Amino acid sequence: MKLRRKILFAIILLVFIPVIVLGTVTYLNFSSAMEKKSSSFYWISLLETDRKLKFALNEITAITNTAITQEALQLSLKREGASLSYDRKQEIGSQVMNHPMITAFSLYSKNRLVYHSNASMPFEELKAQSWFGAMQAAEGRPVWSGPGENGSAHESQPYLVQARVIKDYYSLEDIGYLVVYVKPDLLDQIFWEAATLKKGDILLVNRRGNVVFNKSGQSIGERADFPFLAADYDGGQNYYVDEYQGERSLITFLPSHNADWYLAAITPMNLITAESDSIRNVALVLGMVSLLSAFLFDRYFVRRLVRSISSAVNGMKRVKQGVFMPIHVGVRAGDESDSLIDGFNRMSDQIQQLLNQVQTEQARKKEAEMKALMAQINPHFIYNSLESINSMAVLAGNKDISRMVVSLGKLLRISISHNQELIPLYMELDHVRHYLDIQKFRFEDQFTYSIRVPEELRTFKTQKLIVQPIVENALYHAIEPMEECGRIEIEAMESRGDIVILIRDNGPGFDEETLRNLGSGEAEARKKYSDSGVGLMNVHERLVLRFGPPYGVMVCSAPGYGSSIMVRVPKIGRDSEHT
């Protein structure tokens, strides 16, 4: 990951995320506290509503309790088929209608309608009512049925019904039924006084999910599937959050004193979370401000700092490649990043000066070493050549001496040309050919040789006097000790973009230890195989000094299998001169 991204990520991790997390936790905690506070408020409101409801319904129950125990009503039900007198009707009516909320009533025997006031429901229709079975099972206790249960919610005049079985005062046998119709204003007044939040509602529902009554009056008679109505419900608390009429709401519930009813308070969650929305909005604003601050900090500070560091890193890469270029800064920041760039530029300039100084010294050193090595080669070679000529002159005088002298002159022309270190490959191999021709006069038929060079490699330049010392070593240390005829093969070829010159002989070769000593440059091995220092190691050192470590001499030999010497040199510009 790039440094700039790391810094930006760190800023976001240390500033933006904590702000968002803090705002989220605060928002959730405050919302949860508001839910608990609202549920507690509604729990108290539902308790008060149920208390008032119980008091109001008990007033009606007290009136009916008195009425069903009166002698006039008891006798009217015990006398089967007898009609009621006007006075008896007035007496019963005055007893039952003794409450302003009671609008009508019906008095039934066990099989017919005996008397009614503003409610002429036949007995057969009475038996078809949804609350009739509950009334019989209540054994004289009052059974209530609200507007949402008895079907009157959708009529022009809804009502609340109290129905109960009338028992004989003495024998407690069932002798009839009393059905009292109460104005819904009784419930309306109780629910209207109930404390609710704005847009909140309080419902009275039965166990079947029917809305018996509610404060708003908009959903009476409708069905609502509340989880707490289930017989196996065990929520652990008296409130929960759920969807109600398509809106997410807080629902607080309370079992009513009437075993068949529940009170439920409905509050839209947007009302509860309205106060916590400000906390959420502040957290979002702070988060956006912190994020914007992080990007501005990245743009106007981090980017400039990272640019300075990147420039220094790129400069170091260029220095590693040998390119010393100063880093240019458009606008100076006036901080430590400017000191970093200035320090790097000074360091780069000093390194360049030191390298130039070292390169100059190395070039001088190489030139001095090359001159010293060349000074070692020329006397040695001239000495051997003159010794051969002297031997020929002593033995006999003939034309061969003339040819030998001509070859010697050509050799000397190449050897003493100090002003030209690089010569064409064909000239280097011609030098070897003249040297071998001279040695043929000395060794006569003791060896043969061959030189092969492709036409396309002839004009490439190479270091001079790199093959002749190796051939000389082959003659004196491989061919001369042999009793049979020796063979020297010289071949030039191209390999991996370089020029490789192979010098092979069929001499006795040498063992691995001698080969290692020769490669390590031990004095004894040098003396044994290179005489006065002119030979394999001399050529190798010259090539390394001229072209670098990848180039030089590689020796392969084994006792009884001759030796192979490989000289690797780079391909350097062609020369137009041909022989």
Image (cartoon, grey):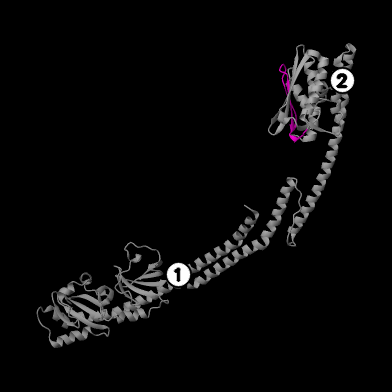
Span of residues in magenta: 551-576
Which disc number belongs to residue 269?
Answer: none
Check disc 2 and give the amino acid type: Val
What kind of element bears circle 1? Answer: helix
Instruction: For label 1, count other residues whose C-alpha is less than 10 Å away and answer few (under 14), some (14-19) or many (20+).
Output: many
- Magenta segment includes 572: yes
Where in the figure is residue 146, as x and y percent of width and height?
27, 75
- Magenta segment includes 561: yes
Mark nearer the N terminus (2 vs 1):
1
Q: Residue 154 lies in what quarter of the image?
A: bottom left
Where in the figure is residue 319, as x and y percent of width and height?
74, 47
Q: Residue at x 64, y 61 (%)?
A: 298
Residue 11 vertical placement versus 483 (above, below): below
What kind of element bears circle 2? Answer: helix
Q: Residue 67 lies in what quarter of the image?
A: bottom left
Residue 54 vertical placement versus 316 (above, below): below
In whole angstroms, how far apart are the C-alphas of marks 2 and 1?
121 Å
Task: Assign the C terminus to one quadrant of the image.
Answer: top right
The residue at which mark 1 appears reads as: 35
Check disc 1 and give the amino acid type: Glu
Q: Nearer the viewer, residue 184 or 220?
A: 220
Q: Which of 88 and 289 is in front in this view?
A: 289
Q: Which residue is drawn at 85% across and 18% down?
A: 404
Which disc number belongs to residue 405?
Answer: 2
Instruction: For label 2, count other residues whose C-alpha is less than 10 Å away and answer few (under 14), some (14-19) or many (20+).
Output: some
Q: Nearer the viewer, residue 87 or 340?
A: 340
Closer mark to the observer between disc 2 and disc 1: 2
